[in-house]
Amino acid sequence: MSNPLNQYIPPALKRQLTGLFYGWSGNYKTWEEAAAKCSGYHTDEIINRVKNAVLKVKKGEAVFERDSVLFDEIIYSFPLLSALSVAAIDCKQLNVLDFGGSLGSSYYQNKNFFINKLPFSWNVVEQEHFVKTGKQEFEDEYLKFYYTIEDCLKDKQIDVLVLSSVLQYLPKPYDFIEHFLKSNFKYIVIDRAPVLLEGNNRICIQKVPKAIYKAQYPCWLLNNEELKNRFLSKYEAVFDHETPESINIAKAAFKSYFFKLK
């Protein structure tokens, strides 16, 4: 049951109170300034929590994992699934490069729609400690792990680049976007990206709920129009969709985008 007192709390104050415990807060001048106040992604606790959760999914002991949290049903991202389906139909195969794809969460989420139906591979590019764990524990006929985009492209002709909840955690996201554009992927899907519907790009700190694990990260809130326009120089927009995740920042939302090479 919701707290009846919530209706008396102004939205701006409610966002501030939420940010004390979890969510997004602050407006930092540089990434380095925000990062100095954060624990980052490299702790043993995080990699072990994620590894143990994904292993349960791999072994059939759990149905779905996201951010180390286990669920008893798959929570689909329908913008992502729609984009993958369009790419598969058009290319008559589906070779995915999942940049920042953890230990294969999106692979386990979507694989049953494509395995044994057409040529299919899911290729994760991640940080070194994730790649080492992925190669040791999770690689199979369809799922592979790589240290760099270039390593992946030497092995596979990629049909779609997946950027699922990752751009906001890159120190220089627009530099990475320029790198992605040079690779001329036929399709690019950005999924679950927190963006500002108004205002300039902003650097925040994101606090993870303690029920997941204790951590806080520097995080970009990119301007919606500027983000789209970076891709529209070489790509046409197939869709631009607001997703249901909540964010405690005014005039911000989570969005997904799907682009096709012109």
Image (tube, helix red, strand yellow):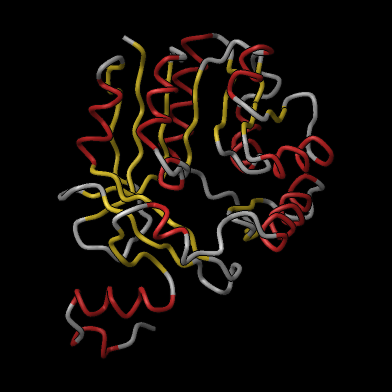
Quarter of the image where one finds residue 102: top right
Quarter of the image where one finds residue 47: bottom right
Q: Please, is residue 214 above or below residue 239 in the view? A: below
- Residue at 42 percent across and 24 percent down: it is 188
- Residue at 64 percent across and 54 percent down: it is 42
Question: Residue 89, percent across and down?
Answer: 49, 14
Quarter of the image where one finds residue 3: bottom left
- Residue at 73 percent across and 25 percent down: it is 142
Question: Residue 190, percent across and down?
Answer: 40, 34
**Looking at the image, how many numbered discs can be counted on the residues?**
0
152 with respect to 11 (left or right) = right
Question: Residue 91, percent across and down?
Answer: 51, 9
Q: Please, is residue 149 above or below residue 173 in the view? A: above
Who is closer to the viewer here, 196 or 88? 196
Q: Please, is residue 42 above or below residue 180 in the view? A: below
Question: Residue 113, percent across and down?
Answer: 60, 29
